[in-house]
Amino acid sequence: ELTQCGGKWQQRVSRSKVKAADLFSGTGRASADSDGELSDDDPIEDPDFQPNFADDSDESFPLDEAEDTLDPSSSLVPKKDTRRIWKHEDIEEFQVPDASFETPDALQSPFQYFKMLFTDEMIDHIAYHTNLYSAQELGDTIKTSPKEIEDFLAILLFMGVFNFPSLEDYWHHESRFSVIADIMPKKRFQLFRRFIHFSDNQQHKGWQSPSIYCVLPSKFICEEEQMLPLGAKVVTTLCQTITQPRLSVVFCDNYFTSFKLVQHLDTSLGVKCIGTVRPNRTGGATLMTDKELMKRGRRAFDYRSAEGVIAVKWFDNKCVNLLSNASGIMPLSTVKHWSKESKAKVMIPCPSLIPAYNEHMGGIDLSDMLVHLYKTPAKSTRWYLPLFGYMLDLSIANSWLVYKRECGQLNQKPITLKRFRLAVAPSQPQPDVRYDCFGHWPLHFDKRGRCNYCPKGVSRWKCQKCNVFLCLNASQECFAVYHQKI
């Protein structure tokens, strides 16, 4: 199913793309205000689902009956007589040190913050594979460069702020928007939209869907990771970028969490994990059934632990299953709950991992809000273009958050996200560069470009330092006028 093309595959990729952001903070809440993400009755089909109606008296579960079936030929498949022993015991709480950041000497430019996340290596990679793909399709490359890729990104950033009904309107003579139209001709921009690429298609011949190979190349994945489901592989790949894994805790929703994932992150990377989980992925934890727990009333919970991982079922508005190797039951904490009797929010006791999950799973709400405020127009039947647009917007949002944090450390007022996004676009020379009267040499090009000073002029001359076309002839001297401060 994962290698099929068509509507079903597209839906899975889209969900994986959106949910990948939930690794560190998700939309779910393990409380009275919880939404559908925390429900065990997830609407997505799960062919491996097997309801667990085990009685509380069971203290072990055969590993061969666990939720995810392994390849019988793999050395990772346990023996049939091996049993996972579940005990009614708590686990030791993992102490996470408070985050600390060094105070910078001075603020950097928005463009420098953006380049921390969207690096020059990534831009060089896009330029190379765009040329390669165009050569494979046309027989000749479109001869792009990293600088032209940056111009293309600048246009996308501007389009996210200034929305026009169609892309052609930015260049049309009746609605021409010079901030975008002066960066690149319309036909050149459309050429980029057609051939922008991120991998070599010829390396994936015989694959119905090479995208998985591009995102998760199997040659970099160990045998144990290959046995994990796709969502767990995404989690593992992203967790490899954590600089201090043994001091970190990852929070996941029930689309990703499984007993094998929690154990694998700890053993391979040293990363702890807390997440909501579907009943068939708890590793066979012998928890009470939903009906039995609901009979005890709201705020009741049951738990079992095995191999350093605790499985908890908590009932508030509905039953929620969680797995954790970072926080357990004690010390009991509290969460706010709406009381119909008193018609006010009251504090109720709960296991300690519940408020820990709720506290750290709210960042995706902020991330989604920031990304959708100024969204790059990237609608396409090619699924990787919306994904690329999302990565660009997410890089802007995250770099702005880093900039905002350093502004707070230096007691300076930060600019808004919109101003930050516009400042990142490196298309127009800054005033201090344009009028510095140094190093502005005219360069002649074979192809003409629209003059950056007069609206109707075209020229083959370009300022070497400002990187803009300017008229330079007997009747039009835009090159000289452009660099003179009036």
Image (cartoon, rainbow, N blue to C red):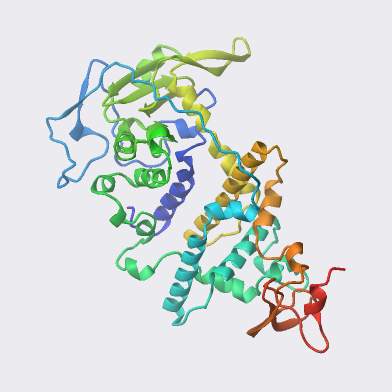
* Total residue callouts: 0
Q: Is residue 200 left or right of residue 360?
A: left
Residue 45 shows up from this direction = yes
Seen in the picture, residue 83 relative to 5 is either above or below; the reply is above
Residue in front for this viewpoint, 241 or 46:
241
Give x and y (percent) for residue 394: 56, 49
Q: Residue at x 75, y 74 (%)?
A: 452
Residue in front for this viewpoint, 470 or 370:
470
Q: Quadrant of residue 342?
A: top right
Seen in the picture, residue 21 relative to 302 is either above or below; the reply is below
Q: Among all residues in the image, which is located at the extreme top? A: 342
Residue 30 shows up from this direction = no
Q: Residue at x 41, y 41 (%)?
A: 44
Q: Quadrant of residue 150?
A: bottom right
Give x and y (percent) for residue 112: 60, 54
Residue in front for this viewpoint, 48 or 450:
450
Give x and y (percent) for residue 159: 66, 60
Q: Among all residues in the image, which is located at the extreme bottom? A: 474
Q: Is residue 486 left or right of residue 29?
A: right
Give x and y (percent) for residue 177: 74, 67
Residue in front for this viewpoint, 214 or 6:
214
Q: Is residue 239 left or right of residue 227?
A: right
Instruction: Tell me the quadrant of the picture where the C terminus can be found.
Output: bottom right
Q: Residue at x 69, y 58 (%)?
A: 163
Q: Residue at x 40, y 11 (%)?
A: 296
